[in-house]
Image: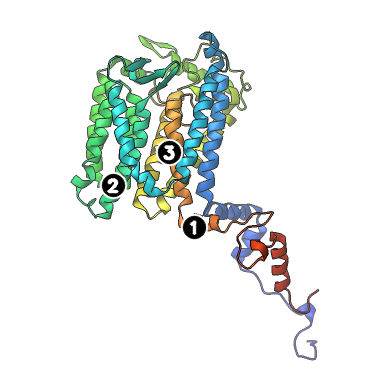
Amino acid sequence: MPSSRTGRPPVEQRRAPRRPAAARTVRDNPVARLHDRARRAWDRPLTAYYLIAGGSVLITVLGLVMVYSASQITALQLSLPGSYFFRKQFLAASIGGVLLLVASRMPVRLHRALAYPILAGAVFMMALVQVPGVGMSVNGNQNWISLGGSFQIQPSEFGKLALVLWGADLLARKQDKAMLAQWKHMLVPLVPAAFMLLGLIMLGGDMGTAIILTAILFGLLWLAGAPTRLFVGVLSIAATLGVILIKTSPNRMARLACIGATEPKAGTTDCWQAVHGIYALASGGIFGSGLGASVEKWGQLPEAHTDFIFAVTGEELGLAGTLSVLALFAALGYAGIRVAGRTEDPFVRYAAGGVTTWIIAQAVINIGAVLGLLPIAGVPLPLFSYGGSALLPTMFAIGLLIAFARDEPAARAALAMRQPRFGRKRGAKGSKLGRSPRRWNTMRRRASAARSSGER
């Protein structure tokens, strides 16, 4: 065999070392390469932060658009300007945005310090609702307080935030003292306080909000590691009370009978709202009839801009629009679970899990009612439906999640390592006049240092 003077085979006969089969598969397969990039993107420290911030902003903005579209006819029927409900929702979203920014910048210890004041304020306002002359009834529920003019507030919405913060702080303190191993410390006083809030809500007849509060309670107990028998016991008590409350109310029994209804009048039961919600979704098709072109909102679909705004979204934006909304809520839920699962702070874990349970459970109940899979509970779609009382505490809760996502050690390190893309960073040590060199100059010096001495 021919060889060179050094005894090695010629260059053309030399073979490059073979790459491992797994590396060749990922590099040569476009699908595998895309999957690998997506997996690395999901594993980045700031993924949860971006998902929570971006997803909540997109849901809120799309909700403002749909509130404007769905509420115009209702406003004109009430002899109001067509943008009346949109202006009120935009004002609430602006105030909620300020609350979100404030909550996202607050330290965890300050959130814990606010737990008891928020709980006390929520209980006081929920009790104030039952005072004659102060509380007011809307759609048969005595759960509102008039603030003058056309502004009302629903204190039970702030009860959700109060239960999340106070319950998380309570469970975190008990975990620090190793008291959660005993069932009495896990249940008391968390469950009695939650039942007190539920009782105040049910005095006004708001079954939907009571269901969301119950979901938050069970979410906190699940995160605290409640034993199965204890969890099943509390669930059985809550289910028994729920059955009694439904059986003793003809209105709730009628709503239960409208699950899966296809005719507006099913015997003696009026299923007009449930059936016309299905009509709106069915007429939307794949891409919808166009923004503002809904037919059902012209008096056929009650509460088109509040509880059934998802149906108007399906009619105007079609399946593509509804799936986009579902994807945004799914991303928000995933990010909340990720924040709760990666932290070592028990308060952050309980609070993040409680907020995620609250938002996802409320979204599932609202969307399930519009699809005819669940009874109509009268709860709004979080961040999306019209209603400032629901929007303000929800946006504050989103600010909590953003603060927790920023507080992760890896996220803090990633935020600290950020450099401005252009311009100069002041205060850097070892630079002239306290200024660091521009980024491209730094990159050029690094590239020059990496070259070999004979390379050109």
Which residue is denoted by mark 2 in the rendering?
A: 171
Residue at 18 percent across and 45 percent down: it is: 184
What kind of residue is marked 3?
Answer: Ala
Q: Earlier in the sequence, mark 1 or mark 3?
A: 3
**Residue 336 image point, x, y percent:** 44, 44
Instruction: State the residue in front, 150 or 15.
Output: 150
What kind of residue is marked 2?
Answer: Leu
Residue at 54 percent across and 54 percent down: it is: 415
* SS class, disc 1: helix
On-image quarter of the C terminus: bottom right
Tell me if residue 23 comes above or below residue 400 in the rendering.
Answer: below
Q: Earlier in the sequence, mark 2 or mark 3?
A: 2
Residue at 76 percent across and 84 percent down: it is: 9
Q: Quadrant of residue 378?
A: top left
Give the CA distance from mark 2 to mark 1. 25 Å
Numbered mark located on residue 397 in the image: 3
Give the CA distance from mark 1 to mark 3. 22 Å
The 10 Å Cα crowd at callout 1, few under 14, some 14 to 19, many 20 or more, is some
Numbered mark located on residue 52 in the image: none
Instruction: State the residue in front, 234 or 69.
Output: 69
Tell me if residue 372 comes above or below residue 162 in the rendering.
Answer: above
Q: Is residue 24 left or right of residue 140?
A: right
Numbered mark located on residue 410 in the image: 1
